[in-house]
Amino acid sequence: MHEKISDAEYAVMAVLWERAPLTAADVAERIAEERDWTLQTVKTLLSRLMAKDAIAADQDGRRFLYRPLIARDDYVAGESGRLIDRLFGGRISPLVAQLAQQDQLSPDDIAELEALLRELKA
Amino acid sequence: MHEKISDAEYAVMAVLWERAPLTAADVAERIAEERDWTLQTVKTLLSRLMAKDAIAADQDGRRFLYRPLIARDDYVAGESGRLIDRLFGGRISPLVAQLAQQDQLSPDDIAELEALLRELKA
DNA sequence: CCTTATCGTCTACATCTGTAATCAATACGA
DNA sequence: TCGTATTGATTACAGATGTAGACGATAAGG
């Protein structure tokens, strides 16, 4: 069980999940499209993620190449599970019902869900 | 758009969503089943929720009766939406797929989802 | 060889969060 | 009436978080 990853740290993880290994400068460059951070900020977040054992760094000459240590799927499953536990007592259908009620569910979503359920039952 | 409600604050909101209005002592008593907090801690959280305009307090003699200002449904929809945006690009079926893949989806869940989808299409 | 750009590390600092202690006012019980 | 329990308000304080600046080492360019 890994430590909690903060919002800002998550943005860094997202970049590394998309492509790794990357140098700090690479990460900063890719993040710049989303957030207005300086290189220093990105470096701080990388160190904190190292401290949390969420990423690892392999030395490459004078700099480091960073890569994720925790799998995106694991993280995603953990976060989803936590939210569903907290808000819906661990059950998924109330979430879907909730989204439907708030009109946050498109016909496409519904079709996809149906297809998925058919597959799950197979 | 309300400010972010922290984990600890959420526990207080949960109590007030279940039953309101309540005094600080009432809230503390109900929360005691879940968390090992002193009355002071609960009072601090209540003040912070007041500052965030998440709850309101009506004076009742010497004490206050607290009640939620934001609806549980709104909060839940906001949090779910945020998570789904962040982790799944705003689409719900990858979430369900994810849960299924991690074996976090019981046959009951699947049945409920099917029923719900039938209803949504009706 | 000397300057400059770049790297990682250390330090900073305000705000938020978790978790209270203390305090002053007041109501209640003996 | 007098001590005590209760209430809200104020203050505390360590750790997490967002957002960097400063610094010393070093590589690269001229």
Image (cartoon, coloured by chain):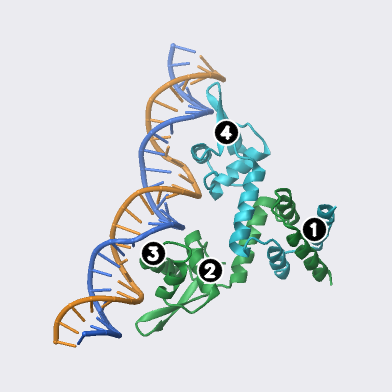
Chain colours: A green, B cyan, C orange, D blue
**Label 2 vs label 1: CA separation?**
30 Å
- Name the N-terminal-most of marks 1 and 4: 4
Residue at image coords 56%, 33%? B56
User: Under tag 2, what secondary structure?
Assistant: helix
Rendering quarter of residue C28? top right
Crowding at dot 2, Cα within 10 Å, few <14 / some 14-19 / many 20+, comes out as some
Rendering quarter of residue B70? top right
Q: Amino acid at mark 2?
A: Ala
The reply to whether label 4 and label 2 mark residues of one chain is no
- Chain containing the residue with disc 3: A
Rendering quarter of residue B111? bottom right
Estimate the x, y position of residue B47 in percent, counting from the top left. Answer: 49, 37
**Label 1 vs label 4: CA separation?**
40 Å
Crowding at dot 1, Cα within 10 Å, few <14 / some 14-19 / many 20+, comes out as many
Q: Nearer the viewer, mark 4 or mark 2?
A: 2
The residue closer to the viewer here, A79 or B31, is A79
Q: Is residue C9 left or right of residue C16?
A: left
Quick one: quadrant of the N terminus of chain B? top right
Q: Nearer the viewer, mark 3 or mark 4?
A: 3
User: Under tag 3, what secondary structure?
Assistant: helix
The residue closer to the viewer here, C14 or B46, is C14
The reply to whether label 3 and label 4 mark residues of one chain is no
**Which residue was labeled with disc 4?**
B25
Q: Amino acid at mark 1?
A: Leu
Q: Amino acid at mark 4?
A: Ala
The dot on residue B113 is 1
**Label 2 vs label 3: CA separation?**
16 Å
User: Under tag 4, what secondary structure?
Assistant: helix
Q: Is residue D8 left or right of residue A88?
A: left
Estimate the x, y position of residue B3 in percent, counting from the top left. Answer: 52, 45
The reply to whether label 1 and label 3 mark residues of one chain is no
- Chain containing the residue with disc 2: A
